[in-house]
Image (tube, rainbow, N blue to C red):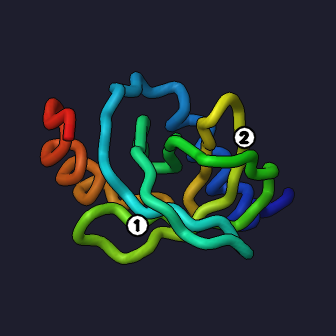
Amino acid sequence: MTTKSPQDIYELAAQEDRSAIRQRISIPAGFRASGTKGYQTAVRDLSLSGFSATAISRIHPGTYCWLTLPGMEALPARVIWWEDGLVGCAFEQLLNPIILETVMNRWRGSGY
């Protein structure tokens, strides 16, 4: 019998979360990839396990990064994909469902 590491458990939860219906959203945020200067971005998709956002340049998968949502501390993540000016990232730790709900309720329909 094998035991699962915390990373294995996270990856399983992240994959399960990817199957959830995702709503488009637009949230102004700060984004910084490791070794680069931070910039303002727009989060396009947010879930318990990650997000997608606009990216001003190509970012390679595996790059460590931070997302700062309004009123929150920076959230560490890793880049999973980059395509046509969008970056998709997985959080290092799953978001608390209450925090996710609060953020989504605040920004849903705001069109900032």
Q: Is residue 52 above or below residue 48?
A: above
Disc 1 versus disc 2: distance between alpha carbons? 19 Å
The residue under the point 43% across, 36% down is: 45
Left or right of 14? Residue 26 is left
Can residue 27 be seen by looking at this rendering?
Answer: yes
In the picture provided, is 49 more to the left or to the right than 70?
right
* Residue 51 higher or lower than 69, as above or below: above
Q: Earlier in the sequence, mark 1 or mark 2?
A: 1
Considering depth in this image, is 84 or 95 the residue closer to the camera? 84
Write down the residue under mark 1.
Answer: 68
Q: Residue at x 34, y 62 (%)?
A: 69
Dot 2 amino acid type: Trp
Q: Residue furthest right?
A: 1
Residue 74, compared with residue 8, is above or below; it is below
In the rendered image, residue 2, in percent from the top left (x then y), is placed at 85, 59
Image coords of residue 15 (percent x, y): 62, 37
Q: Residue at x 18, y 53 (%)?
A: 102
Can see residue 93? no
Q: Amino acid at mark 1?
A: Thr
Percent from the top left, x then y, of residue 89? 61, 49
Of residues 25 and 42, the one nearer the viewer is: 42
Circle 2 crowding by C-alpha within 10 Å: few under 14, some 14–19, many from 20: some
In this rendering, the answer to whether 35 lies above or below 13 is below
Q: Nearer the viewer, residue 45 or 92?
A: 45
Q: Quadrant of residue 77?
A: bottom right
Q: Secondary structure at mark 1?
A: strand
Give the number of the disc on residue 81.
2
